[in-house]
Amino acid sequence: MSFAQRLAEARQAKSAVKVQVIGDRILERRQSATSEGGIISVATDITERKRMEEEVLAARDSTAEAQAKLSDAIENISEGFVLYDSDGRLQLCNGKFRDFYDYGEADVAPGTKYQDLVRLDAERGIIADEDDQGEGYIDRRIAYRKEEKGSFGVKPADGR
């Protein structure tokens, strides 16, 4: 294509972005027509940006794969597992944990507060607490969570 043809094409398009590979470099060419009939053309070497984009995509794929493996491992352990963040919001749990407390998926959605689950246990009468089924039980569980010392044993009301 001659220079005159490229000039006519650029004027007609008003603006254009083209990516070219030249050797081992990737160039982005931006062209815009001026109001006087001229053309402004800027070429930018985007090789590094493209390389970084590929690295980010590869890392994202690797992270997703690692998360899937971790999720499978947590789901397949024989004990109940739950993870809360520093604000006491549920991050993830496995099926054994849900089954023990008879929680549905909606009950243990990520972000659910620890104290909301404790209150749900008390409301549903899921836990057999010799001392108190109501507020006393809730207060002890929440106090335990704040201190995080020792253990807090619970016995399901159905005798499991």
Image (cartoon, rainbow, N blue to C red):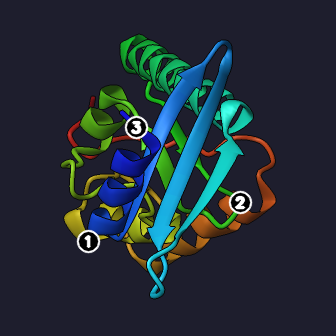
* Residue 84 to residue 36: above or below: above
Residue at x 51%, y 30% (from the top left corner) = 20
Residue at the spot of label 3: 2
Q: Callout 2 environment at 10 Å: few (<14), some (14 to 19), or many (20+)?
A: few
* Residue 96 to residue 132: above or below: above
Residue 63 x %, y %: 55, 25
Residue at the spot of label 2: 86
Labels 1, 2: front one: 2
Residue 51 x %, y %: 66, 26
Q: Secondary structure at mark 1?
A: helix
Residue 85, image quadrant: bottom right
Q: Secondary structure at mark 3?
A: loop
Foreground residue, 34 or 43? 34
Looking at the rendered structure, the kind of residue marked 3 is Ser
Image side of residue 85 versus residue 48, left or right: left
Q: Callout 3 environment at 10 Å: few (<14), some (14 to 19), or many (20+)?
A: few
> Who comes first in sequence, dot 1 or dot 2?
2
Looking at the rendered structure, the kind of residue marked 2 is Ser
Residue at x 25%, y 34% (from the top left corner) = 99
Residue 40's tag is none
Image side of residue 27 versus residue 102, left or right: right
Residue 123's tag is 1
Foreground residue, 51 or 149? 51
Query: Cα distance, mark 1 to mark 3?
Result: 81 Å
Residue at x 69%, y 59% (from the top left corner) = 144
The single residue placed furthest to the bottom in the displayed view is 35
Residue 156, image quadrant: top left
Residue 136 x %, y %: 52, 75
Image side of residue 64 versus residue 50, left or right: left
